[in-house]
Amino acid sequence: MSMLITVTKNLLEGFSTTFEIFGLTLLMALPLGLIISFGSMSRFKVIRWPIRTIIWIIRGTPLMLQLIIFGFGPGFIGIKGVNTFVAAIVAFVINYACYFSEIFRGGIESIPKGQYEAGQVLGLTKTQTFFKVVLMQVVKRIVPPMSNEFLTLVKDTSLANTIMVYEIIWNAKRLANASGILWPLFYSGVFYLAFCGILTLIFGYVEKKLNYYRG
Amino acid sequence: MSILELKNIHKSFGKTKVLKGIDLTLEKGQVLSIIGSSGSGKTTLLRCINLLEIADEGEFLVNGEVIFRAGEKISAKEMQQKQLHFGLVFQDFNLFPQYTVLDNVMLAPKLHAKEEYKKDRKKRKEIFDKIREEAIEILDRVGLKDKIDSYPCELSGGQKQRVSIARALALKPSILFFDEPTSALDPELTGEILKVIRKLASEKTTMVIVTHEIDFAEAVSDKIIFMDDGLIEEEGTPEEVLKSPKSERTRAFLTKLSDQ
Ligand SMILES: Nc1ncnc2c1ncn2[C@@H]1O[C@H](COP(=O)(O)OP(=O)(O)O)[C@@H](O)[C@H]1O
Ligand SMILES: [Mg+2]
């Protein structure tokens, strides 16, 4: 029994790190992703192409590799004392911002041109048209792909342990090794399941709320 | 003074010359119908006047005021101001799906009222109540008073098009433009739209209507133009253009239509 309590405590500690990575990544990657999506749709080639190239590189290479580069890279070029947690957050934010930006871009580009034109002939400014006409429709369209990304992020946080961020799986592994027992690993899976379950419920609710109209 | 005056409007897309010099005048309270085969530039003309496309050459005036002159840059704010002379009813409605019928109609008037109530918060409610009252009255005029709380997805094509007419009317445009307002509709639904336009005509609303409904155009118009290949091939009263066309091309077009 005391073993169960010790393990639970340890895993909860690890999970709080997991949750921090999750929360901080969303907090920064969502707005950054929106900015990147505008860049990737820019009329100006000098903005559009560099941004699309970065998106291609980030989405075309493993997140694990990016974590390793951000985690250990600074040490190699002589920058000492970089906190690996911070490095992990930077890697996650950049990686997810690129994925989010593609979702935003898909959503924004899927809105028919007629919606913008209707806004224009009604004398709305571009900003008014974006916020009052387009945005809500974009939100409705991106909720399902966003929900996928959120769930993927929950599980991707575990990759941070490759650069020695002590998230939940790190703790589970350490317990398993130290005590020669397997179940803490399964137990850590329960945390992911519960968290993903809650997210699924929330997204289901939001989708239902947004279903008051079609189109 | 004419309410609308177009002078030598040209528009190309790349190498395709779509409008090759359109001159046109329209008097207040008149209804002008534009007919012509597909691809002759009717939509492009409406889009140029409504500033959705920028014409390459020419100018146009509303009540003598220059709205557009090719090559002259204007600020976004001025553009917005000038836009409000016109209302445009699209072929495919372009209603805002996330808003109710009433909110579709009130959205622009509310946003435009911002300047008025910015300094005085109390005035806001007063203004919004008035906008609401007017919107309901307009929706009543197009026969949709019982649909004000519906969403566009719950409406038939004909009802959607009437909402889009109401939305345009709510801004009290000097001239209301229609681009084939019935061509996205099932045949049995065209009647309700034509009825609304007829009513607007009887109330002396200045309108420009692109249409293939020749009988309707004949009944409602003061003036008809036949466009062909980016030019006005023929213009005159419905009687002149439809009954005794001077141009061979007009005749060919009318024959082809009546054969269908
Ligand atoms: N945005 C555009 N880019 C290129 N060509 C266009 C565009 N809009 C219209 N056109 C061309 O202009 C011509 C006239 O089109 P349009 O004004 O829609 O004619 P109508 O409304 O009389 O059928 C067509 O040949 C069409 O392909
Ligand atoms: Mg057309």
Image: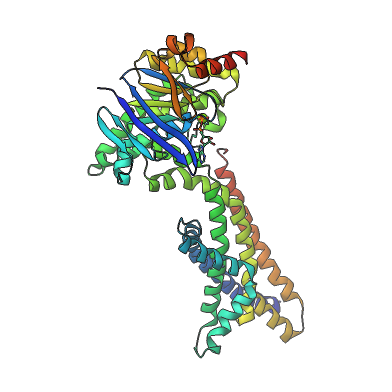
Question: Which residue is found at the position 54% from the left and 59% from the top?
Answer: A101
Q: Which of the colour schemes (rainbow, by chain, secondary structure, one colour) is used? A: rainbow
- Residue A9 seen in the figure: no
- Quarter of the view holding residue A215: top right
Residue B18 location, x and y as percent?
A: 47, 35
Please state the total of marks drawn on the protein image: 0
Question: Which residue is found at the position 53% from the left and 73% from the top?
Answer: A89
Relative side of B81 to B196, left or right: left
Residue A154 location, x and y as percent?
A: 62, 66
- In the image, A163 versus B189, the foreground residue is B189
Residue B107 location, x and y as percent?
A: 39, 36
Question: Which residue is found at the position 30% from the left and 35% from the top?
Answer: B67
- In the image, B250 versus A176, the foreground residue is B250
**In the rendered image, the vertical position of residue A66 relative to residue A28, given as above or below:** below
Relative side of B144 to A125, left or right: right
- Residue B87 seen in the figure: yes
**In the rendered image, the vertical position of residue A43 relative to residue B12, given as above or below:** below
- Quarter of the view holding residue B51: top left
Classify the position of the N terminus of chain A by image quarter.
bottom right
Question: Which residue is found at the position 25% from the left and 29% from the top?
Answer: B64
**In the rendered image, the vertical position of residue A188 relative to residue A166, given as above or below:** above
Residue A112 location, x and y as percent?
A: 53, 42
**In the rendered image, the vertical position of residue A5 relative to residue B251, given as above or below:** below
Relative side of B103 to A188, left or right: left
